Every structure is written in structure tokens, then in C-alpha cells.
Image (cartoon, coloured by chain):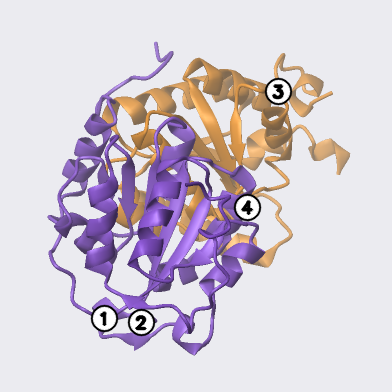
Chain colours: A orange, B purple
């Protein structure tokens, strides 16, 4: 049983994300893994709708999704906070000047109880980087907001040809599990 | 001729192959394209010479993002498996993103051919030596990454045979040419949106808005 079902919400966050990706024809999923993303990754691998690519670095994933978009296939990059920190050059020199509607879903590490000092430091860089590049970004904190935020951000990204960063807050991904710790 | 032809995939090493000219090889590639094949040119002199070879609409000139020409080409090949896709990349760029070779090997796109120009130098910044000048063998790395059809290019005729193999769609193909340090023969017009829009239109795609698919 997933966390949000256990918390009384009828659908887990990862089920909602999968549903909204399919509604919006986002077929290509690329990722460098993270423990928080693991349920979503597992769910996507199990669904033939998706083409899944697992590159060695997040930059590669940005290149792959950019190329696929330019050839008519919509895609998303899944990563954790530290993975996002490797991306500023690819974003600033490829995605932004070419106006690529790059979808990013970032599991937010380094806040609200993380044990990794490195994650905590790098977490502080994420929003300033996104904001300095004027990349639309929202944190998703509550199960009832997942569909609204993901759906709207995807739609706006393609309509305005702009990148979008959907941040999965521990408030969403870890709150229901808190009692298990 | 196909990639499985062993005469195409040779065993020559970096030190024994002919040193050729990047602009000449790029022109030879362009002259053999006849079916709206996509060509992704990596940063700097690689895409300058692609530009100089004739401004095909199906060329994508990668202005920044050093190292991402192969991932971009992989994305194009995934989205349009019926179209042949060529990636052109430099040794310095590929050295930055070696993992991409393993990614290509894991996907096995039949419609993707990768050509690398290895001049052993960061030519555009003053010809400082790259690691290939100190012994790194990119073809050996590609083979080790799982790209079985990897080869050094012995001469221009071999290059043309490799282009034909790429056109035949028996990829993924990885081929590396030793190149000289002649200056590029042109400079790309640096307008990223125009490059992207022209590329997409030439691939028969709308450049704006909500297509494709089920956005409501």
C-alpha cells in the first residue's frame, strides 16, 4: 500500500504523475535515480506506454529530451537535487536560448530532515539557480495539489515553449512515511 | 554495404590512420545525404564546418552545451526511428560526456551514426592538447561502452563507405577520424531559436504550442 493511500488520499502521488504524463502525451522518461523517485520509476518501467532511458548523467538526459522534443516526442527528466546542480550550463546554453519546453521533476533532498550534509548544501542552490534563469518552478507539498500543479506546469511549458521544474517536496513524498521512521 | 560488413569496421589504430580534413569530410557527408536525414553538429568548429557544408534545414547546430551533440542526436533518433540521424562531435566534447556512449549502446538505435573528429586539440581555444593527444583512444572506449560497430576511419573512401552504412540504417555506428588543425570554413549564424525552428519545420513538426497529442 502506498504512502498516500495509507494517509487516506485515494491515489498515490506517483500514480497521479503517471496519469498526468499520459494525458499530456509525455512518453519519454529519462532519469538518474533517487530513492524518493523510486516508486515513480518502478511504476513507469512497468508501463509500456513509456520509453525509458537511463543515462549516466542528468546532462545527457537534458540532451536526449531536447532532441526528442525537436523531433516530435515529449519527454521529462527525473532527478534529485544534486543532479539538478549539474545542469546549469546545459540549461543556460541549450534549453533556454533554444526555448525548449524541458520538463524536470526534481525530488527535493537536503531539507526537512535529510541526513546528508552534501545534500543540504546543494539544496540551497536549487531555487536561486532556477530563479536566476527565470525557469518556472513550483514545489508540490500536498497530495491534493499533485494533479493541478503537474498538469498546469506541463501545459504551460509546451504552450509557452519554456522549461518547467516540478519540485517534489518531502512534505509530499515523505510526510506520510514519517511515522514509520 | 552495411555495418556488418567487416571491411567497414576495421581494426586500424589511431596512430595508423590518415589525417584528414574536417571540412572536407563534412562536405562528403552532406553530398551523400538524400532523404532529409538529420545531422546534429557539436559545439564550435564541428558545427561551423557543418554550416559551411551547406545550410540544410535538417542540420542542428549546437551552439553551447559542450558534449551534448550525441545525446541530442539520440533523442532525435528515438522520436523518429524512420529517419537516419548523424551526430558530428569533436574529441574534446566527447571526452566530457563519455557516458553517452554507453547510453547509446543501451538503446541500440539502428538509425544513429556517430562521427567524431579527433584533432587531439581544443582547436578553437588555442589548440591546447586534449587527452586523445596523450593516448586516450575514443574508438577503444566506444567498443568498451558496448558499441560493437566502432572503427577508426582509414581514409576518405572508408569514410564515404561508413556514411553509406549509416544511411543503410544498420546502426548504431561509431567512427572516428583523425583530423588536421585547418581553420573551419565558415561561422554559423548564432540564432538558437531560428536554428531550432528551422530544424523542427524541416522534420515536419509545428514549432509552437500544444501539439502533439492529448493536451486539452
Q: Nearer the viewer, mark 2 or mark 3?
A: 2
Task: Look at the picture and state if A69 lies above or below A106.
Answer: above
What residue do we see at 66% from left, 23% from top? A48
- Kindly state the secondary structure of the residue where label 4 is placed: loop
Q: Quadrant of residue A141?
A: top right
User: Gap in Å between the C-alphas at discs 3 and 4?
Assistant: 22 Å
The answer to whether the residues at label 2 and label 1 have Cβ atoms under 8 Å apart is yes
Disc 3: which chain? A
Q: Position of residue B154 (x, y in %)?
A: 43, 71
Residue occupied by mark 3: A12
Residue B121 badge? 2
Q: Nearer the viewer, mark 2 or mark 1?
A: 1
Residue occupied by mark 1: B181
What residue do we see at 48% from left, 26% from top? A149
Mark 2, residues whose alpha carbon is within 10 Å: few (<14), some, or many (≥20)?
many
Task: Name the outermost residue toward the top.
Answer: B216
Amino acid at each position: 500500500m502506498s504512502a498516500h493511500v495509507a494517509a487516506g488520499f485515494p491515489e498515490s502521488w506517483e500514480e497521479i504523475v503517471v496519469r498526468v504524463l499520459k494525458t499530456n502525451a509525455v512518453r519519454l522518461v529519462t532519469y538518474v535515480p533517487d530513492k524518493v523517485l523510486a516508486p515513480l520509476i518502478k511504476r513507469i518501467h512497468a508501463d509500456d506506454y513509456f520509453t525509458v532511458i537511463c543515462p549516466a548523467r542528468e546532462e545527457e538526459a537534458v540532451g536526449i529530451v531536447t532532441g526528442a522534443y525537436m523531433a516530435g516526442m515529449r519527454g521529462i527528466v527525473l532527478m534529485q537535487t544534486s543532479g539538478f546542480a549539474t545542469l546549469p550550463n546545459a540549461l543556460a546554453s541549450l534549453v533556454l536560448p533554444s526555448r525548449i519546453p524541458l520538463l524536470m521533476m526534481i525530488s527535493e533532498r537536503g531539507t526537512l530532515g535529510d541526513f546528508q550534509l552534501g545534500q543540504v548544501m546543494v539544496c540551497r542552490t536549487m531555487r536561486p539557480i532556477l530563479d536566476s534563469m527565470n525557469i518556472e518552478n513550483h514545489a508540490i507539498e500536498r497530495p491534493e495539489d499533485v494533479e493541478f500543479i503537474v498538469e498546469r506546469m506541463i501545459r504551460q511549458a509546451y504552450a509557452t515553449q519554456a522549461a518547467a521544474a516540478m519540485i517534489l517536496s518531502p512534505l509530499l513524498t515523505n510526510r506520510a512515511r514519517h511515522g514509520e521512521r | 554495404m552495411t555495418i556488418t560488413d567487416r571491411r567497414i569496421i576495421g581494426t586500424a589504430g589511431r596512430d595508423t590512420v590518415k589525417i584528414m580534413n574536417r571540412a572536407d569530410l563534412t562536405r562528403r557527408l552532406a553530398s551523400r545525404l538524400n532523404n532529409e536525414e538529420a545531422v546534429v553538429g557539436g559545439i564550435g568548429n564541428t558545427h561551423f564546418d557543418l554550416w559551411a557544408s551547406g545550410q540544410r534545414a535538417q542540420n542542428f547546430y549546437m551552439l553551447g552545451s559542450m558534449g551534448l551533440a550525441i545525446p541530442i542526436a539520440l533523442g532525435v533518433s528515438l522520436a523518429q526511428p524512420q529517419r537516419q540521424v548523424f551526430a558530428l562531435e569533436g574529441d574534446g566534447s566527447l571526452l566530457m560526456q563519455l557516458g553517452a556512449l554507453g547510453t547509446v549502446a543501451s538503446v541500440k538505435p539502428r538509425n544513429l551514426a556517430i562521427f567524431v573528429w579527433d584533432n587531439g586539440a581544443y582547436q578553437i581555444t588555442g589548440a591546447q592538447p586534449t587527452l586523445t593527444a596523450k593516448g586516450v583512444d575514443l574508438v577503444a572506449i566506444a567498443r568498451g561502452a558496448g558499441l560493437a560497430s566502432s572503427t577508426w576511419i582509414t581514409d576518405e573512401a572508408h569514410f564515404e563507405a561508413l556514411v553509406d552504412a549509416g544511411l543503410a540504417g544498420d546502426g548504431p555506428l561509431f567512427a572516428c577520424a583523425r583530423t588536421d588543425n585547418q581553420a573551419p570554413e565558415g561561422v554559423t549564424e548564432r540564432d538558437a531559436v531560428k536554428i531550432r525552428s528551422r530544424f523542427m519545420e524541416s522534420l515536419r513538426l509545428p514549432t509552437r504550442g500544444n501539439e502533439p497529442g492529448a493536451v486539452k
